[in-house]
Image (spheres, rainbow, N blue to C red):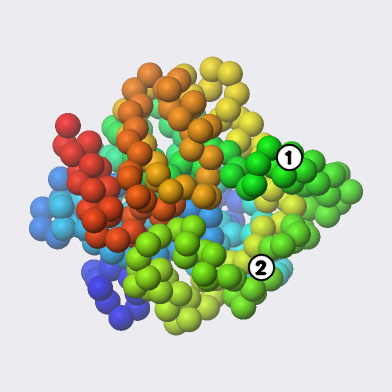
């Protein structure tokens, strides 16, 4: 891996969306002859550098990999004057971004390649909506630790969070930090974060070192507007008949030791998808793509086998 925390031989660019927002994109070509193309859709507050090792694994296996930072995070344009605030009140707009990247960047460059999708956590919510709205674009899709619903301390606390977010937005506080959200990097409890995300200290530390080298990639806690956006999006994917319309073959890999997202809701949705299968990865925490080798190797092998089948 290169000294700038990105895969070697990658091409980093910034591409303007139709509303003028510029997204940071990355193209990472296969080692040797490319056989297919992957679009990697990351999760909330993530950035390309977090996926360097994961991207390189697929480059070695003959895949071209495209990735990007969502609007409002990483190296893409932020949505507010305060760049630390995570503020995306319209998740449908991010689905539009995905489609523009596919149509403007990936298809023209690799028109004859099979196109696969890998999405993680919050990225799976965008992926599910994309697969629903744009059938037939991706041949297969992998969903890692899907975010279909909150997992924030029980039904009562979840209800209170949703109610307070709706009230705050109604009162005009959309752009304010939600309670308890990090206003800067010093507010991050790394012990709690590590214990929720992975068992691998070195891989966790990699992303922190990347942020120390590139502090502009950091994004802090969410606003009330972001909460409104995610609540609306979750309501859409949970609505009657929605996921039943998705015909794309899907493999979902869930973490057994999940403390970030709601696996029970995800399983209910997967059971409704006509071409979805899933596995629960034993001993894994939320970020399976940067877990210890024993777990991570399983994840990569299952993805590779799914794409080859």
Q: In this view, does 241 lie above or below 31?
A: above
Residue under pointer 1? 156
As rendered, which of 29 and 197 lies closer to the eye? 197
Q: In which quarter of the image is the N terminus?
A: bottom left
Q: Which of marks 2 and 1 is in front?
A: 1
Q: Is residue 101 visible?
A: no
Residue 183, numbered label: none
The picture places residue 54, in percent across and down from the top left corner, at 29, 58
How crowded pointer 2 is (Cα within 10 Å; few <14, some 14-19, many 20+) is rated as some
Residue shown at 47% from the left, 47% from the top: 258
User: Mark 1 and mark 2 in contact (Cβ < 8 Å)?
Assistant: no
Query: Is residue 259 at all visible to an observer of this figure?
Result: yes
Q: Residue 273 placed where, x, y %?
A: 42, 22
Q: Please, is residue 267 above or below residue 244 in the view?
A: below
The CA span between labels 2 and 1 is 23 Å
Seen as rendered, the residue at the extreme left is 32
- In the rendered image, residue 86, in percent from the top left (x then y), is placed at 64, 60
Helix, strand or loop status at disc 2: loop
10 Å crowding of disc 1: few (<14), some (14-19), many (20+): few
Front-lying residue, 213 or 238: 238
Residue at the image position 33 percent from the left and 44 percent from the top: 281
Secondary element under disc 1, as helix, strand or loop, is helix
- Residue 36: x %, y % from top left: 20, 44
Callout count: 2
Q: Mark 2 points at which residue?
A: 182
Position of the C terminus by quadrant: top left
Query: Is 267 situated left or right of 297 in this image?
Result: right
Name the side, left or right, on which 197 lies relative to 175. left
Closer to the chain start, of discs 2 and 1, is 1
Q: In this view, does 42 lie to the left or right of 297?
A: right
Examine the image and state in which quarter residue 27 appears: bottom left
Which residue is located at x 25 percent, y 43 percent? 303
């Amino acid at each position: 891996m290169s000294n700038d925390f990105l895969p070697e031989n990658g091409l980093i660019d910034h591409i303007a969306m139709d509303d003028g927002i510029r997204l940071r994109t990355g193209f990472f070509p296969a080692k040797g002859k490319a056989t297919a193309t992957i679009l990697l859709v990351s999760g909330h507050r993530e950035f390309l550098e977090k996926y360097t090792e994961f991207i390189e694994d697929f480059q070695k296996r003959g895949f071209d990999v495209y990735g990007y930072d969502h609007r409002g995070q990483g190296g893409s344009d932020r949505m507010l004057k305060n760049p630390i605030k995570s503020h995306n009140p319209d998740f449908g707009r991010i689905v539009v971004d995905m489609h523009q990247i596919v149509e403007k960047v990936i298809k023209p460059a690799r028109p004859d390649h099979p196109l696969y999708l890998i999405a993680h956590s919050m990225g799976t919510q965008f992926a599910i909506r994309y697969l629903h709205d744009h059938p037939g674009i991706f041949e297969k899709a992998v969903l890692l630790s899907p975010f279909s619903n909150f997992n924030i301390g029980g039904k009562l606390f979840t209800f209170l969070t949703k109610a307070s977010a709706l009230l705050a937005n109604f009162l005009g506080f959309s752009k304010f930090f939600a309670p308890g959200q990090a206003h800067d990097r010093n507010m991050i409890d790394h012990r709690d974060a590590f214990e929720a995300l992975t068992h691998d200290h070195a891989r966790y530390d990699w992303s922190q070192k990347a942020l120390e080298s590139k502090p502009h990639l950091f994004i802090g806690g969410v606003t009330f507007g972001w909460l409104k956006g995610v609540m609306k999006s979750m309501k859409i994917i949970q609505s009657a008949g929605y996921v039943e319309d998705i015909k794309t073959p899907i493999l979902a890999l869930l973490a057994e030791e999940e403390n970030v997202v709601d696996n029970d809701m995800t399983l209910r949705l997967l059971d409704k998808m006509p071409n979805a299968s899933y596995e629960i990865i034993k001993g894994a925490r939320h970020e399976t793509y940067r877990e210890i080798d024993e777990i991570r190797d399983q994840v990569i092998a299952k993805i590779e086998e799914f794409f080859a089948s």
